[in-house]
Image: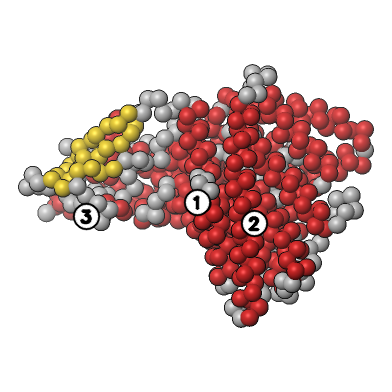
Amino acid sequence: MKEKVKKYLQAFADNGVNLVLISLLTGIFAGAVVTFYNILMSLGEETSIDLYMLVRENPAFIPLLFAGLAAGSLVIGTVAKFVPMVRGSGIPQIEGAARGKVRFNWYVTMCSMFAASLACVFMGYPAGAEGPSLEIGGCAGGAVGTILKRNQMVKRLQIASGASAGLAVAFNAPVTGLVFAMEEAFRSFSPQVFVCAALSVVSSLFTRNALRYGILGKDKVGFTFKDFAFDFSFNGEGAIFCLWVVLAAIIVALIGVGFYYSVFAAKRIFKKITFFKGVGKYMIPFLLAGAFGLITVYSLGGGHDFIQSLATGSSGVSSGKIEVERIFGISVIATLFIVFIIRFITSALSMGCGVPCGVFIPMLAIGAGIGAILSVLFQKAGMNPIFSDYLVIICMATFFTCVVKAPVTGIVMVFELTGQFSNFLPALIGIVIGYLIGLLFKTDAIYEKNLEQYIKDNKLDENFRKERVRLFIREHSKADGKAVRAIVWPSNGLVVELIHEDGSQTVPDGETVLRAGQEIVFECETDDLKELTEYLHGITGKQE
């Protein structure tokens, strides 16, 4: 009896208390690093705007600006060449690491992404902080798992938890970060992923708010699209607005499909550019971004300010009139169209070239820009102006969902960033249409497709081979008493056989409950059988 109690307490410590403490530690570490990163990113955006305003007022500085951009792009391209983990937003790579498909050195990746993406913003590149924040958070989770010498299962859980914490800190949106980790990073809504990610998100946001309060003051603690106003109810006008949403969602989703194919067309083109040993290709997006920065301030930074400028009312009564800084005195709709084109091009080039910067918020800015254009046009066709702000936000989420294929994250993001948890129907209509049109045109989730290409380009799949591992399920292990679907198995793996204590064999499904004393046969593609076995031991218990 005493031995049994001892084993139970040990299992509780391994599967419960230790995992809780490690997840909290991951959140604190990720929250601290990502908070400092985002503070510096905000400073970088302000500095770059001032710099471009100075150059616009003093055209003699234009050659100096482009010389600096060319030199800076070569440095950033060199970093991306030697540290592949920082290419692009970093989101596909950290998703791959959480699933065991990609290996990385946490401190090299963290420092490289921190410095390179920050340099992009100081140079005026239209870069968001959210993607790099997610990767930096994932590196923090990897650091905790490595330093504390945890097994492979715990390490991957912490990478996913750190990534969700990083995104939550960047957005100040805990539920969005949590859902994104489950829907994208692990592609699993298991209790283990939820608990670890939730604890990391909570501790990271406490850390974030404490640090920002201490450094910047209380008025700088949070960020949401608070200037947007909503006035929707499902009455006559509300029903008509839903029809406008259907039309807008179709248009936005078709543009999203175009963006998807533009990214991969850009990838093919950039692969053919080899001057300066392939690093020279980075000059193209940076020089274009510099030219765009001289045209409008809305082409700089991630796009928060641009999205905020599309709001028409913060008092609950929307006028429907979008007031943006005009480009060369042209009309509002022409200005919006130019900003949309600029952001479409720069975001596609960023992902196509692999510039180490975030495109999460820039993609939202593209969707919001389309929504603003449609709002102006729809109002002329008879749409009630009070729905203008809501249409902008719906289009933003629709574009994101069509490209990223994360509908749950999209709907949660709408509610969390706007602070509006009512008026569910129009947002749901837009997001569903965006998702379905993406499926109709056979587009994949863009981060998933980028991960596949990253693995192929870096030849990470050459050493992968199919392996079968047979293990006993130990008492009080993570697998004991759990359904197959509730367990976070290694990516692309499958329990192909269950051997019962009496020797009989069955093929389990997701609802099959595993018990101590049974054996499982697990099949998976891996490049490291020892690591796979160690991961599975973390689920079934240490083998005697």
Three-letter amino acid code at disc 1?
Answer: Leu
Locate the N terminus by quadrant.
Answer: bottom left
Q: Position of residue 11 (x, y in %)?
A: 25, 49
Q: Is residue 495 visible?
A: yes
Q: Which badge, 3 or 2, comes first in the chain's sequence? A: 2
Badge 2 local density, few (<14 within 10 Å), some, or many (20+)?
some
The residue mark sitting in front, 3 or 1, is 1
- Across and down, in percent, residue 108 comes to 54, 30
Task: Identify which residue is drawn at 74% across, 72% down.
Answer: 382
According to the picture, the residue beneath numbered tag 2 turns out to be 251
The residue labelled by disc 1 is 439
Q: Which residue is under mark 3?
A: 513
**Distance in Å between CA atoms under marks 1 and 2:** 15 Å
For image coordinates 66% across by 78% down, the residue present is 237
The residue under the point 87% across, 33% down is 62
Tell me how far mark 3 sits from mark 1, CA to CA. 34 Å
Q: Report whether 455 appears left or right of 541.
A: right
Horizontal side of residue 370 vs 112, given as left or right: right
The amino acid sitting under disc 2 is: Ile
